[in-house]
Amino acid sequence: MNKDVTVAWEVGAELGEGPIWSDSLQALLFVDIRQARLHAYHPDNGERQSWDLEEACCWLLPREDGGFVAGLHSGVAELDLDADGPRIGKRLTPIKWLPDGDRLNDANSDAHGRLWFGSMDNAEAEIHGFLFRLDSRGLVEMDSEYHVTNGPAISPDGRTLYHNDSARQIVFAFDLDDDGELSNRREHIRLPEGAGYPDGMTCDREGGLWIALWDGGRIARYRADGSLDREVTLPVSRPTSCIFGGDALDRLFVTSAATGCDDEPLAGALFEVDVEIGGIATTPVVMPNDSTL
């Protein structure tokens, strides 16, 4: 195994995704979409917790008034987590709002607490994925015609939003203004055939973009100009996402998937990677008014 990579938890997630660092819990939270499970890993003491969810969950983000916002199979909702486990609260999007067979996939918040997330055909057959924004103005379709949405990630200065179409092996970049409007959509990175598929990603504090490469067996850091800086090989072929965690946000955690990897003993594990650089804090989501939902 790469000397910079350690196994944090052999959790065996079928489709580990959506890692997020929680300051309030001092834990790395992530989900298993296919098993409808929520996991928490406390790196300081090694404590591990897992809960069954009422329905599949694709991601969590902290919300400004406490608790979390969750991307569920049925839409976006509030979620609270305490000693009794997770509880789903107020729905922020209609329960039936996506085409049959579609689900959410990956989310992030910008510096103003606006929520950005994608949708996709769960069977990965149809090309009708969207990039959405949810804020005080309500739910807005910001981009469309994705095959498999992934990301998004926000640059440290808050001026660039990155979003993937994994199936096409492309990372797009957009200019992001203070009002949450996107412009200048452009191809930022195109991976060559056989290099893997760009999955979940995050920015470090120097503006580097770290991407988990599904079927690529590694994570890669790209400079702000889109050029490749470095790669870290992992002992699994399907890493799914990555996020910085810990008090100083100086520990990079990577989720992975066990699906389709029966011959890989560590498939579905959570990894920690020493990259000698720190990340940026996730801005809690500012909840929209009920009148905008």
Image: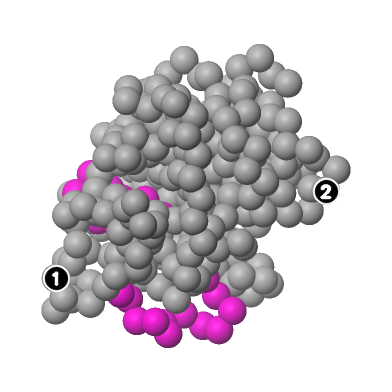
Between circles 2 and 1, the one closer to the viewer is: 2
Q: Amino acid at mark 1?
A: Asn
Tell me where residue 127 appears, x and y as whole percent.
60, 71
What residue is at 55 percent from the left and 84 percent from the top? 100
**Tag of residue 110:** none
Tell me where residue 59 appears, x and y as whole percent.
44, 56
What residue is at 67 percent from the left and 54 percent from the top? 14
Please say whether residue 3 is one of the residues in the magenta stretch: no
Q: Which of the pair 236/209 is nearer the observer?
A: 236
Placement of 68 over or under 10, stated as above or below: below
Q: Which of the pair 274/111 is nearer the observer?
A: 274
**Mark 2 touches mark 1? (CB < 8 Å):** no
- Decide: few, some or many residues near mark 2? Use Cα within 10 Å; few <14, some 14-19, many ≥20: few
- Give the residue at mark 2: 262
Placement of 4 over or under 271, stated as above or below: above
**In terms of image quadrants, where is residue 1?**
top right
- Quadrant of the image containing the C terminus: bottom left
Please say whether residue 112 is one of the residues in the magenta stretch: yes
Look at the image and give the residue range highlighted in magenta.
Answer: 91-116
Tell me where residue 250 appears, x and y as whole percent.
40, 22
Placement of 65 over or under 139, stated as above or below: above
Q: Let me know if residue 111 appears in the view.
A: yes
Chain-order first, disc 2 or disc 1: 2
| Secondary structure state at the residue bearing disc 1 | loop
Q: Amino acid at mark 2?
A: Asp
Horizontally, residue 35 falls left or right of residue 160, namely right
> Distance of mark 2 from mark 1, alpha carbons?
46 Å
| Secondary structure state at the residue bearing disc 2 | loop
Placement of 36 over or under 183, stated as above or below: below
- Give the residue at mark 1: 289
Q: Let me know if residue 209 appears in the view.
A: no
